[in-house]
Image (cartoon, helix red, strand yellow):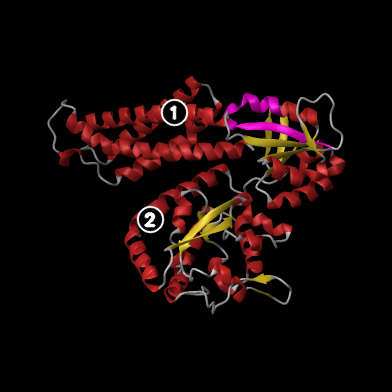
Amino acid sequence: MLERLWARLTGSVLFWDLWLTLFALWFSSSVRLWVDLGYDLTAEHVHVPWPLYPAVALIWGTIFLILRPQRALFTSGMVEALGRLVGAVVLSSASFAGLLYLSFRDISRLQFIYFVLLNLALLLLFHLVVRVVVRMRRQGSEQHRVLVVGDALAGQQLATEFERRAWAGLKVVGYVSDQPHVYSCLPHLGLVDDLPQIVAEQQIHEAIFALPPQQHERVARLSLELLKQPVMLHMLPSVLDLTFARTPVTMIGGIPLISLRESPFTPAQRVLKRMVDLVASGLLLVLLAPLFVVLALLIKLESPGPIFFWQERIGEYGRRFRMIKFRSMYVDAEDRWHEVAHRDEHGRLIHKVSDDPRVTQIGRKLRRTSLDELPQLLNVLRGEMSLVGPRPEVPYIAAEYEPWQWQRFQVPPGITGWWQVNGRSDRTMHLHTKDDLYYIQNYSFWLDLRILLKTLRVVLRGQGAY
């Protein structure tokens, strides 16, 4: 639970730390010209060679991941957190100085000092602002609502521990139990079997099972019923559970917690994946801007209606978001869905056909080349999607999922994925769930890279898309 929150917060802070560091490196050239100290230099002499930018990002990123000043920002006192940040900047700067000595020795020493001082000032200010903002927001309306299932006394103890960790923004709002505890300070919200309904009504983010070992089958049944809701599940384990647990055990104030539905990504994998998504989507949006303009004109000239098509999809943990694509159908396509939707011999809904009459001529070309998917880079930039992952599903199809199929929503959906490079639309939605689960269970950075390379080959062939 806390590891996931740490990863999300520290990953975002690390990303902006690196951008501020690169800005300081770039801006140090102007500072060297403006501050009238040392020898008179021209703009050519203070120009920073481009190889230094990725080198600085690598040095600062590596040392910051080792010393973890971003984590200390949320878990340690002010002095320790800022002290660790200063130490990380000093060690990174020393490593960078060694690199300059071995490579670009013409860089002005004053310019290097200005870069280090500017970098330290920007990061200290940024960390102070983040620390204040996070504490203010976590104590306000953006708290994660926690529900305890079972033992009210365990709920009270957890509530006390969460109050001591205000940065996490976790608040126990009550408990559900078949036998309410008369001395509990927490509100009793209902019976255990009513858990799915209570989670939806109370907008619960985290549910913690505190039931005895003999009710594990009940926990399993309720966990399956909750797969359709964006709620994280945890359990207070017994001694036997701790012995055979295959998932990480989090200790909160001496209370062990096993997560039943945490992301399959490790914190480091999630940070790396998000950084790649941010950098790649940002660069592609800039580079492909002229192509966006051309495609927008072609869509507008062929048929009346908007350039973009927005559709509600289901993303990570069942959260809904609006996915954007170039419009490839006529504007009344949503009202004509019954013209193509049909059921196979097993009664399963099929909503895609190769000769869909609702698709425009330019739309067919966009789909064949997957150019209609390019605006989803905006969804990636906003954190709703990833470059690689399971396809974001439409709600009316997800409504017919069997419980096991909802496991595909454990990770962010992607523009491309294992299913898309192994058949695309030639394979039905009911078969690609197994491909999505394969991706989740075998995730690695290299698998993502392999899928991206295979995507280029599949798109160039126009294989299986309609």
- The image shows residue 201, relative to residue 321, as above or below, that is above
Q: Is residue 196 left or right of residue 96?
A: right
Residue 286 magenta: no
The x, y position of residue 310, in whole percent, is 50, 59
The x, y position of residue 96, in whole percent, is 33, 36
Name the foreground residue: 73 vs 291: 291
- Residue appearing at x 42%, y 53% in the figure: 281
SS label for mark 2:
helix
Give the residues drawn in magenta, as a range: 159-177
- The image shows residue 383, relative to residue 257, as above or below, that is below
Name the foreground residue: 242 vs 356: 356
- Residue appearing at x 54%, y 62% in the figure: 417
Label 2 packing within 10 angstroms: few (<14), some (14-19), many (20+): some
Name the quadrant containing residue 21.
top left
Q: Is residue 373 left or right of residue 162?
A: left
Name the foreground residue: 58 vs 130: 130
- The image shows residue 53, relative to residue 291, as above or below, that is above
The x, y position of residue 409, in whole percent, is 63, 54
Label 1 packing within 10 angstroms: few (<14), some (14-19), many (20+): few
Q: Which residue is mark 2?
A: 285
Which amino acid does the dot numbered 2 rest on? Answer: Leu
The x, y position of residue 115, in whole percent, is 29, 32
Q: Is residue 328 left or right of residue 406?
A: left
Task: Tell me the quarter of the image containing the N terminus.
Answer: top right
User: How far apart in space, not on screen, are marks 1 and 2 (Cα)?
Assistant: 29 Å
Whichever of callouts 1 and 2 sits on the residue coming sooner in the sequence is 1
Q: Which mark is residue 129?
A: 1
Q: Is residue 88 left or right of residue 173?
A: left
Q: Tell whether label 2 touches label 1 (CB within 8 Å).
A: no
- Residue appearing at x 82%, y 40% in the figure: 191
